[in-house]
Amino acid sequence: MKSLKTICIALCAALVLVGCNMNNTAKGTAIGAGGGAALGAIVGALAGNTVIGAAVGTAVGAGAGAIIGHKMDKAKKEAEAIQNAQVEEVKDANGLDAVKVTFASGILFDTGKDKLSNEAKTSLQQLAGVLKGNSDCDVAIQGYTDNQGWKNSTAEQSAQKNQALSLDRATAVSSYLLALSVPATQIKSVEGFGEANPVASNATKDGQAQNRRVEVYMYASQKMIQEAEQAAQ
């Protein structure tokens, strides 16, 4: 574990150095040239987060990384216009630029429910437009809850109910996007992780609210990667 952490620290330091004052295109070039796949996998493992990304088998070249970075710059800018969404740049399992769109569950659903609110539908309609406009991006949808218990349930039962609720909410988002004509082939995974991977402390109401969320990831598909590699030759 010590050697793994040492490698991670070195790779992260390299990423920080190349990341300052760069857009995704420039960072894509650096990552493609510098072992991005290893960095993405290590960071994902240490952070405890589910790693998203196409299975490509080999490191993506610098030129392809730059092309993909440019595409993700565009997708991120479009996603930033979505109502009630928090948009971030992240890395996929290949170390390539990806876009994470987070919706607070309080915006999407009533407490303990999985039926989308009208406000949620407006935001998801905007998201659907972004996804369809970036059809060469694959999509992963992940639901999460806080760790609060359910009435008349043990801690284990509550955890199971939270996991089921998180999956139902992720599925509700996926189903609505499909109803809006987002291609089923574009949505690669729909998962519920319940109380896992909190982004804030569950010791406060604010932290609990942040942990109740649905995350939508846009990342480079195998087709995008292959076309980028070909264009970079």
Image (cartoon, grey):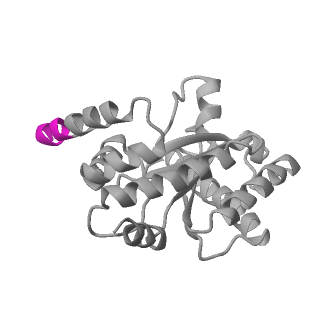
Q: How many marks overall?
A: 0
State whether residue 159 is above or below residue 218: above
Residue 85 lies, in percent from the top left, at 69, 41
Q: Residue at x 29, y 55 (%)?
A: 37
Can residue 115 be seen here? The reply is no
Q: Relative to residue 84, is residue 227 drawn left or right? A: left
In which quadrant of the rendered view does residue 53 lie? bottom left
Residue 230 in the magenta stretch? The answer is: no
Q: Residue at x 16, y 36 (%)?
A: 6
Residue 115 lies, in percent from the top left, at 79, 56
Q: Residue furthest right?
A: 118
**Foreground of the two, 25 or 217:** 25
Q: Residue furthest left?
A: 3
Residue 6 in the magenta stretch? The answer is: yes
Which secondary structure type mostly characterizes the magenta part of the structure? Answer: helix
Q: Residue at x 32, y 44 (%)?
A: 43
Q: Relative to residue 91, is residue 15 drawn left or right? A: left
Can residue 156 be seen here? The reply is yes
State whether residue 232 is above or below residue 149: below
In which quadrant of the rendered view does residue 203 lie? top right
Quadrant of the snapshot with the N terminus: top left
Quadrant of the snapshot with the C terminus: bottom left
State whether residue 16 is above or below residue 27: above
State whether residue 175 is above or below residue 36: below
Q: Give the residues in magenta.
A: 1-7
**Foreground of the two, 197 or 150:** 197
